[in-house]
Image: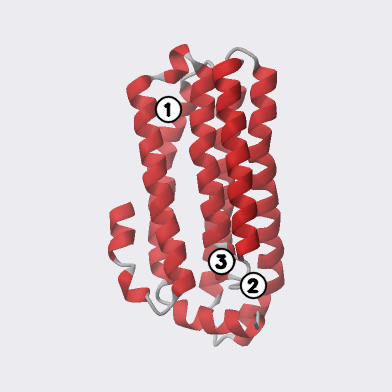
């Protein structure tokens, strides 16, 4: 799926924001794939649940960053500034230190694990708030000033991002609540291909309206 999305990216070179959204999606799909493979090979959930939780939170946090950097700018092209990048990278470094310090030091202390993963949940909640605030400000105006072809884009963006947010936050919460159980990962293994396939399909279809969407976004968010 990542290769399919990456293969068609070059044709959108004149739409850098959409192109970046595609590349970031490719990146987090690859990272998630690596994470799933590591879980399958080492089976941390059976004998070291804290490391399993740390690994899961590590790549889901990357997914949250890619969501903020990739999809929010589709509505506001001025969102991703150097300040935002520095802030998000700093929070991720802090999160990594917390996730793995807890996993390697207090491996049987759920309280500390909860505190560490709280960094992810706070970041994800803030990114979600920013996205929906931007969406509510822009979406209806996009439909009003368009020629009628933005309705499907707006509906896709909301549905797709609703699913991404629910999947991301729900997955980390589910695996954290049941640290010694294997069934949450079985559920994720079944849901992930469907979820990822829908995202790739939808993001690819967005290419058909990217020119109009970019023009309207420029009008709604002047420099």
Residue 70: % across, % down: 52, 61
The residue under the point 52% across, 40% down is 60
Residue 214 to residue 134: above or below: below
Disc on res. 139: 2
Asked which colour scheme the image uses, the reply is secondary structure
Residue 111: % across, % down: 70, 19
SS category of the residue bearing label 2: helix
Q: Identify the residue under disc 1.
A: 186
Mark 2–mark 3 Cα distance, whole angstroms, equals: 9 Å
Q: Is disc 1 surrounded by few (<14), some (14 to 19) or many (20+) residues within 10 Å?
A: few
- Asked whether residue 21 is in view, the answer is yes
- Quadrant of the rendered structure where residue 133 is? bottom right
- Quadrant of the rendered structure where residue 47 is? top left
Asked if residue 69 lies left or right of residue 109, the reply is left
Q: Identify the residue under disc 3.
A: 155
The C terminus lies in quadrant: bottom right
Going from the N terminus, do you reach mark 1 or mark 3 first? 3
Residue 93 to residue 78: above or below: above
Residue in front for this viewpoint, 90 or 209? 90
Of discs 2 and 3, which sits in the foreground?
Answer: 2
């Amino acid at each position: 799926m990542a290769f399919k999305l990456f293969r068609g990216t070059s044709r959108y070179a004149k739409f850098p924001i959409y192109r970046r959204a595609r590349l970031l999606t490719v990146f987090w799909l690859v990272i998630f794939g690596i994470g799933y493979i590591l879980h399958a090979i080492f089976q941390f959930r059976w004998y070291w649940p804290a490391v399993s939780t740390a690994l899961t939170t590590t790549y889901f946090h990357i997914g949250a960053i890619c969501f903020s950097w990739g999809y929010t700018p589709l509505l506001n092209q001025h969102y991703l500034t150097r300040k935002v990048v520095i802030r998000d990278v700093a929070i991720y470094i802090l999160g990594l230190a917390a996730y793995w310090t807890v996993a390697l030091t207090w491996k049987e202390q759920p309280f500390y694990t909860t505190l560490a993963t709280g960094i992810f949940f706070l970041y994800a909640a803030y990114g979600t708030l920013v996205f929906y605030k931007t969406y509510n400000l822009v979406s209806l105006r996009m439909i009003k000033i368009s020629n009628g072809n933005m309705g499907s884009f707006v509906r896709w963006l909301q549905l797709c991002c609703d699913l991404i947010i629910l999947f991301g936050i729900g997955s980390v919460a589910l695996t954290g609540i049941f640290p010694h159980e294997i069934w949450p990962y079985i559920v994720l293994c079944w849901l992930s291909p469907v979820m990822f396939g829908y995202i790739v399909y939808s993001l690819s279809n967005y290419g058909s309206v990217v020119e109009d969407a970019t023009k309207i976004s420029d009008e709604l968010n002047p420099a």
